[in-house]
Amino acid sequence: MQATSKGKMENISQEPKPQDQQNQPSTKIEIEAENLNFFYSQKQALYSINLKVPEKSITAFIGPSGCGKSTFLRTINRMNDIIPGTRVEGKVLLNNQNIYAPTVDVVDLRRRVGMVFQKSTPFPKSIFDNVAYGIKINKLSSSRAQLQQMVEQALEQAALWSEVKDRLNDSALALSGGQQQRLCIARTLAVMPEVILMDEPCSALDPIATEKIEELIVELREKYTVIIVTHNMQQASRVSDYTAFFLLGELIEFDETEKIFTYPKEKKTEDYITGRFG
Amino acid sequence: MEKKPLADTVVTDFSSILPPRKKSWLMSPSADSAFRYLTAGLAVFLLALVTALVVSMVYNSQLSLSRFGLSFVFSTTWDPVKEIFGALPFVYGTLVSSLIALIFAIPISLGVAIFLTEQCPYKLRPIVLTLVELLAAIPSVAYGLWGIFVLVPFMRNYINPFLEGTLGFLPLFKGPSYGIGLLTSGIILAVMIVPIITAIAVNSLTAVVPTQREAALALGATRWEAMQVVLLNARSGIIGGVILGLGRALGETMAVTMVIGNRPEIAVSLLAPAYTMASVIANEFTEATYDLYLHALIEIAILLFVITFIVQAMAQLLIRQISKGKTSYAKAN
């Protein structure tokens, strides 16, 4: 099941792409939203979003609470599907394949598009089993030794290995808040995703833990496409290559982070980042 | 006319506009301490009540306690005519019928709870939940009556012959069967404790933070795999529900008395009649014509009390063992 759907996606991504590269010439577009509308029952939460996120980059979504940035983030791995009464119009393309097409295997999609939540979400299992969980359910390892190696690698990548290597069998719930969040990142990395979505990953952490996560996010850019929702403007300017500003369900402006924070084109963006509202 | 400065119009002393507040006794410090003594007194009263209960039970069973000693618990003979009393058949009947009840009730309750929290259409959910809770409100004598007139004939005519026919080679399902017996009482008990376990399991499942499910789904879990993560989170609550159900099953008297057959014997077959501790007390206290008989019945009551207490204590330990580390989770968040 998994192998076939993956093969299909690779075929599609090799098809010639339409030459429409206004934002970023010479970089491959990983995620693209086309006229995306989103509804919670009757209430519309997103209004015709058009956005292209290049691969192996960090994109920050900023905007006041309730502007739709988290909703949009959750359309990229179809996490909104589990909320009853929600509806999507338009397309979200991942490597040029519409993830809302009826043939898409949602379970496989979510493995390819990992997600880290605002509050850390360790399972009530040991540290090892938390990281091994995704590997096991996706049957990514063929032996116990390989599983152990993959867990170690994921923890290394998440800069947590040295802190937990002597207590892998302890409950993950005994870790500190920052460690728990890095464990969740390790767990996400362990299933080898292409995209990592982060929904305010540092908002519940102290500055030191936040710094560690931010360093980690910057390192992740080498291998993954990262999208991070944040309320922290400094964080957006520190870590991201691109910034998207949302307001009342609309994408107001999307550009390189430097441009957004120095010469925003839109008055609303300027008002927001200078703290005039929000 | 000169305007008054604004500051003067600001009212700081409300006594001029509000009616003078009565100094009631309830606001005095002595009322405070009186309230404290009142609540402390009520708490002490409750403790004293339990102590008095235990003391009077022990006092009123001393004839039996001194005559049979520990052998009361292990003897299988219950013969009021010869004045020999042993409680083992009742202990056995109580434990086994409750165990049967759990075996049937746990999967059913969990299934219903998972259906209600996962699959059930949003509008149907409160209706089904109300129905489940309604089951818990039915008096046990009504269950017993239903047991006698519906369940017992059904067991006698269909289930028990089927069990004898297919599994009859096992001593556990050997005939003859009368419809009444351990299995039937276990089923009645299961019906009675399903609502309790279901209601608590639903509460525990809905109390699991939704991000646990989402985190599992985000790792590529199927709906069923994500459900397992949710169950893992809710397990201590679910076990608590099972223990409450077990507590009710152990102490249930009326419905069981009506369908278990009331024969103080330990039979291996689940189809054979048996007796429980609660049933023998309810059935025979009016017939206890001499003191030793009455004292033996009261000793059974003590035994039931002790067994229930042990089961509850073990359950508490189990839950504490399982939820280890949860406290640190709460702290970190």
Image: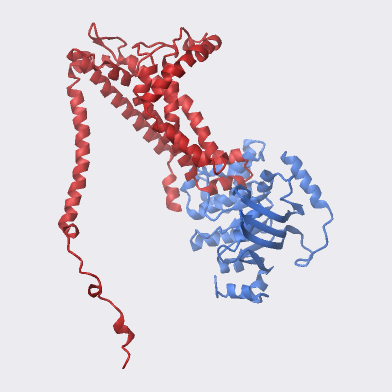
Query: What residue occupies the far right of the structure in this picture?
Result: A16
Query: Can residue A155 be seen in this snapshot?
Result: no
Residue A221 location, quadrant? bottom right
Along the line of sight, which residue is nearer the eye, B50 or B25?
B25
User: Vertically, is B139 above or below B201?
Assistant: above
Lateral position of residue B91 relative to residue B127, left or right: left
**Residue at 74% over, 40% down:** A3
Along the line of sight, which residue is nearer the eye, A52 or B157?
B157
- Percent x, y for residue A163? 52, 51
Lateral position of residue B121 relative to residue B63, left or right: right
Shade representing chain B: red
Residue B9 location, quadrant? bottom left
Lateral position of residue A16 relative to residue A212, left or right: right
Tell me how many marks there are: 0
In the rendered image, what is the letter of the chain coloured blue? A
User: Vertically, is B39 above or below A270?
Assistant: above
- Percent x, y for residue B134? 43, 34
Query: Can residue B155 be seen in this snapshot?
Result: yes
Along the line of sight, which residue is nearer the eye, B326 or A174?
B326
The quadrant of the picture occupied by the N terminus of chain B is bottom left
**Residue at 35% over, 11% down:** B263
Q: How is the rendered protein coloured?
A: by chain
- Percent x, y for residue A129? 55, 41
**Residue at 37% over, 35% down:** B316
- Percent x, y for residue A182? 55, 53
User: Vertically, is A23 above or below A86?
Assistant: below
User: Vertically, is A90 above or below B203?
Assistant: below
Residue A227 location, quadrant? bottom right
